[in-house]
Image (spheres, grey):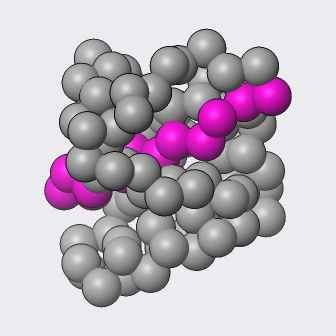
Amino acid sequence: MELNNKQKQHLKSLAHPLKPVVLLGANGLTEGVVAEIDGALEHHELIKVKVPTDERELRTAIAEAICREVKASLVQTIGKTLILYRPAQQPTIKLPR
């Protein structure tokens, strides 16, 4: 799903008070972590994920892999925190046009 700038701004404002729901550990991106992210997106629609690496290229690669695996949209990357969005079966977040 491709988000326009207005939609991203709206989601950023909604994500501001959220705490990271999923924290990647020393093992990195495993099937269990992907399943946890998938479940969290289904329940919350908008989540934060904490990636513990200092390398920007690796964080970008992890973000792309997560989005590809769970079919989510990357809203924003702030340091080591990713903000992900995927509409649920019964969406509760109304996106602007």
Please give the name of the residue rendered at 67% of the width and 21% of the height, measured from the top-left corner.
91
The vertical placement of 22 against 58, above or below, is above
The vertical placement of 18 against 38, above or below, is above
| 44 or 53, nearer to the observer | 44
Left or right for 87, reference 61: right
Please state the horizontal and vertical placement of residue 72, each as a whole percent of the image: 60, 53
Please state the horizontal and vertical placement of residue 25, each as a whole percent of the image: 53, 57
| 10 or 16, nearer to the observer | 10
The vertical placement of 76 against 14, above or below, is below
In the orientation shown, which residue stands out farthest toward the left?
79
Left or right for 82, reference 44: left
Please give the name of the residue rendered at 36% of the width and 76% of the height, measured from the top-left corner.
60
| 9 or 39, nearer to the observer | 9
Please state the horizontal and vertical placement of residue 9, each as a whole percent of the image: 23, 36
Please state the horizontal and vertical placement of residue 32, each as a whole percent of the image: 78, 55
Quarter the N terminus occupies? bottom right
Left or right for 35, reference 87: right
The span shown in magenta is 77-89
The vertical placement of 87 against 50, above or below, is above
Q: Is residue 47 magenta?
A: no
Say if residue 35 shows up in the picture: yes
Please give the name of the residue rendered at 50% of the width and 19% of the height, measured from the top-left corner.
94
Q: Is residue 85 magenta?
A: yes
Say if residue 27 shows up in the picture: no
In the orientation shown, which residue stands out farthest toward the bottom?
57
Please give the name of the residue rendered at 33% of the width and 21% of the height, measured from the top-left corner.
14
Write down the quadrant of residue 54 in the picture.
Answer: bottom left
In the orientation shown, which residue stands out farthest toward the front?
97
Numbered label tally? 0
